[in-house]
Image (cartoon, helix red, strand yellow):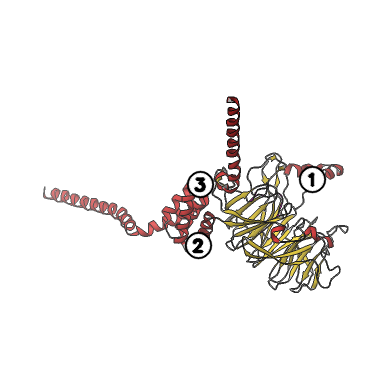
Amino acid sequence: MHNKKIIIKTGIAVIAALATLLQPATALASSTGEYGYSYNYDYWGDVQESPDLYSVCKVFTSADLGLDVKLKNPQGMFVDGTSIYICDSGNNRIIELERISPENIQVKRIIDSFKGGTPNTFNNPTDVAISEDGNMFVADQGNARVLKLDKNLDYVMEFTKPNDNTLDPSLVFQPSKLAVDTAERVYCIATGINKGLIKYENDGEFSGFVGATPVTFNWTDYIWKKFASQEQRAKMESFVPTEYQNIYMDYEGFIYATSAVQTNEDTNKVTGDAVRKLNLMGNDILVKNGDWKIIGDLYFGSGGGYEGPSIFGDVTVMDNDIYACMDKNRGRVFGYDDQGRLVFAFGGNGNMDGYFRRPSAIEHIGHELYILDSLDCSITAFVPTDFGNLVYSAIEEFDKGNYDKSTECWQKVMDMNGNYDLAYIGLGRALMRQEHYKEAMDYFELKYDRDNYSKAFKQYRKQWVEEHIEWIVIVILALFLIPLGIGKSKALKHEIDTADIFTLNRKG
């Protein structure tokens, strides 16, 4: 009997211990900021855990949306106002959703056919965009075309394979991603075409390629290739531009394009750019003033079926110029400001809320983020936390010229996270705009921001000179006049002494 009691007590203790061990696993998903769900990199490249800038509001599945036919391999997503368009690629249809609130999204209509055109149905649609006039553009990949439909879903025209002599005649046109500007010019990414973005005029005419990625190569391989035989060249890697992964057109008409980066086999360092901001000429004008490249994770290896650097499969740009990049390799989201500094990083691969199995698209409404998962067939809605709202307020107040409010917000951010480099830099920039250059220099010095420190020091020096100009003039005059006066005095004394001696000599 005594042994039985011991066994029972031991069993209860084991169950309690297991319950205690299992509880933090749930907390890990909900209180993720404390355990490293959100993080950042400091000046030294060390990972710094951060309070969450975003929290999961709700995960929408086919059942939550009330769909009779479940989502199947959804690939593309586009936001127009409060409407969210989903490319349900596996079911050959476009689903239009209406966002009532972050936790309430409803199906508005299902588009699986249209009027006119041959055929008048979709075949593996992979992306969709809505123009300012309300016309719909669809990358109808299976039908080798980009469709243009009007508001009433009437067929208008289609954009087909570019008529270009440099393209392989046997290449099948497979448009994957697209963007449309205010004039309804179409910019398209197609599988197997690495010459840049395919540009069509609004009349459907192909007008060339835009923004080809720079070719990166190793000089040793390049020289060796010059002397190699034809068979050896065929086996070597070709130096060709990298295909873009996705594109997004911001509110100013600039195109943000993402591409997979490469790593140097010897140094294991990333080469090339993961994000480019293209102007009308196709030139990259993305500002890169951050301490680190815009490539996502700085450290990577292999494990758990994932290896290599981050792969930005999609990007979305908010009105405050913060752009969020979705890493389809490890299921993470990286946000950067207009200077190229990392604002936030969160997420990962997994089955819990806030994690992803195969993210395929990212969009935003205001500050809210929406991420589409093609394997889970779900949409995750993220909303900013109090910490995130403070960061956004600090950035936006600065852009508006309200530097006092920006300073207050950055100070609160710093109080919540003393390891957040962006708060020190943001506070320094706000103080510099308020002409508190000495204080700004102190914050820049703490985070080794040499460029801004130099700017603040230059202004501080100018300010100090202006405030002390009277004393400076007095000192300069004193340095000039005192020696002159002493010299004159000595000369005068010498003349007097000489005159006295001369007079005495004459009297004698």
Q: CA distance from mark 2 to mark 3?
A: 22 Å
Q: Nearer the viewer, residue 306 or 69?
A: 69
Image position of 166 with respect to 348: above or below:
below
Quadrant of the rendered structure where residue 88 is? bottom right
Q: Secondary structure at mark 2?
A: helix
Mark 2 nearby-residue class (10 Å; few <14, some 14–19, many ≥20): some
Q: What residue is pinned by disc 1? A: 237
The residue positioned farthest toward the right in the image shown: 170
Question: Magenta segment: does it hold 208?
Answer: no
Q: What residue is pinned by disc 2? A: 397
Percent x, y of residue 63: 71, 58
The magenta span reads: 352-362
Percent x, y of residue 457: 45, 53
Mark 1 nearby-residue class (10 Å; few <14, some 14–19, many ≥20): few
Question: Magenta segment: does it hold 354?
Answer: yes
Q: CA distance from mark 1 to mark 3?
A: 43 Å
Mark 3 nearby-residue class (10 Å; few <14, some 14–19, many ≥20): some
Please say if the residues under marks 1 and 3 sit with CB atoms less than 8 Å apart: no
Q: What residue is pinned by disc 3? A: 419
